[in-house]
Amino acid sequence: MTAKSLATCIFCKIIKGDIPSFKLIENEFSYSFLDIGPLAKGHALVIPKYHAEKLHELPDQYLADALPTAKKIATALGSENYNILQNNGKIAHQEVNHVHFHIIPKPSESDQEG
Ligand code: 5GP
Ligand code: ZN
């Protein structure tokens, strides 16, 4: 992590409120919001309030908050079918270099018909 990556990081800017977002949950350790390019309705992201590019660089107290927050969002979505996804590194499809967890609902066929 460099000072430059922090200053230019879009997720750090979202945490600071410099870039608007649709906030879901915020606490001392994390900020969660709707993904701008959802793979399904309700696709959300949980990001730690600490600039680490990859999971292994993230202090444990931030990591410890992420899954319970993802669980709250999954519960609020009310879907029995969803994926939790967390990419690390360019060839593993990480596009934003600030640790984040995706919560991606998987609507059932009957959900999609409606
Ligand atoms: P990655 O491929 O890095 O795991 O996922 C990055 C995610 O961040 C993508 O799903 C993308 O749509 C989302 N994203 C990128 N920029 C923004 C933004 O400015 N606002 C929001 N809400 N989501 C963003
Ligand atoms: Zn950042």
Image (cartoon, rainbow, N blue to C red):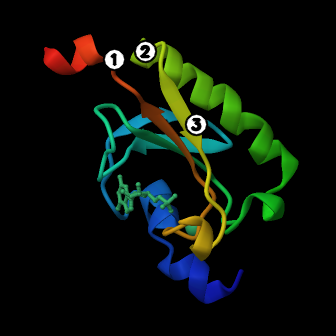
What kind of residue is marked 3?
Ile
Residues at marks 1 and 2, CA–CA distance in whole angstroms: 9 Å
Determine the residue positioned at 69% across, 32% down: 67
Quarter of the rendered structure image containing ligand 2: bottom right
Point out residue 18 in the picture as x, y percentages from the top left corner.
Answer: 37, 64
The residue that disc 2 covers is 79
What kind of residue is marked 2?
Ser
- Tell me: residue 112, above or below residue 59: above
Q: Quadrant of the N terminus?
A: bottom right
Label of residue 84 in the image: 3
Q: Determine the secondary structure under disc 1.
A: loop
Determine the residue positioned at 71% across, 65% down: 54
- Among the two numbered marks 1 and 2 on one chain, the one whose residue lies closer to the N terminus: 2
- Tell me: residue 11, above or below residue 77: below
> Which sits in the foreground, 89 or 22?
89
Closer mark to the observer between disc 1 and disc 2: 1
- Tell me: residue 102, above or below residue 114: below
> Which sits in the foreground, 13 or 114?
114
> Which sits in the foreground, 65 or 106?
106
Residues at marks 2 and 3, CA–CA distance in whole angstroms: 13 Å
Residues at marks 3 and 1, CA–CA distance in whole angstroms: 17 Å
Point out residue 96 in the picture as x, y percentages from the top left corner.
Answer: 50, 68
- Among the two numbered marks 2 and 3 on one chain, the one whose residue lies closer to the N terminus: 2
The residue that disc 1 covers is 108
Q: Is mark 2 within 8 Å of ligand 1?
A: no
Q: Quadrant of residue 70?
A: top right
- Among the two numbered marks 3 and 1 on one chain, the one whose residue lies closer to the N terminus: 3
Point out residue 100 in the picture as x, y percentages from the top left corner.
Answer: 58, 52
Q: Quadrant of residue 58?
A: bottom right
What kind of residue is marked 1?
Ser
Determine the residue positioned at 66% across, 40% down: 28
